[in-house]
Amino acid sequence: MKQRLVCASDDLVDGGRGVRFTVNRHGVDEPAFAVRFRGQVHAYLNRCAHVPVEMDWQQGEFFDHSGLYLICATHGALYAPDSGQCLMGRCNGKGLVAVSVTEHDGRVLVIEEGRDSVG
């Protein structure tokens, strides 16, 4: 298991802009993002559960106007920032795919396990 830098902890503000990065999943680099919500960092593949399109409505903008929900720019599906669970939209019980991250010494790190870095 190894860790790779995503960003500085200060780059993520509660309910604010996220940071985009890539993870290697099954030998394919996939877009992902990290956000801060209620003091904790959460990361997901940058892919809506309804249709596999990237979520941000502008680069790094994943939260709705309230800063309480992640929103898909394409369909308006809403997700819980702390779990990735779909709260509203045509997700059919699916949620966002979580990516394992940790925060240590002022840095946010993605945890990569072998060839698969998605948790």
Image (cartoon, rainbow, N blue to C red):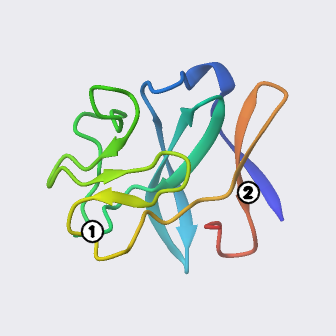
Q: Which mark is residue 95?
A: none
Q: Which mark is residue 111?
A: 2
Which residue is drawn at the image coordinates 75% and 70% (left, top)? 113
Quadrant where the N terminus sits is bottom right
Amino acid tagged 2 = Ile
Q: Gap between marks 1 and 2, in whole Å?
A: 23 Å
| Farthest left residue in view | 75
| Farthest bottom residue in view | 26
Which residue is drawn at the image coordinates 67% and 76% (left, top)? 115
Q: Is residue 114 left or right of residue 49?
A: right
Disc with the residue nearer the chain's start (1 vs 2): 1
Q: Position of residue 83 (x, y in %)?
A: 54, 55
| Farthest front residue in view | 87
Q: Does the residue at mark 1 contact the one at mark 2 (Cβ under 8 Å)?
A: no
Q: Is residue 118 left or right of residue 90?
A: right
Quadrant where the C terminus sits is bottom right
Q: Which mark is residue 52?
A: 1
Which residue is drawn at the image coordinates 65% and 74% (left, top)? 116
Rate crowding at label 2 as few (under 14), some (14 to 19) or many (20 or more) other CA atoms within 10 Å: many
Q: Secondary structure at mark 2?
A: strand
Amino acid tagged 1 = Pro
Quadrant for residue 86, please give it. Answer: bottom left
Q: Is residue 54 left or right of residue 42?
A: left
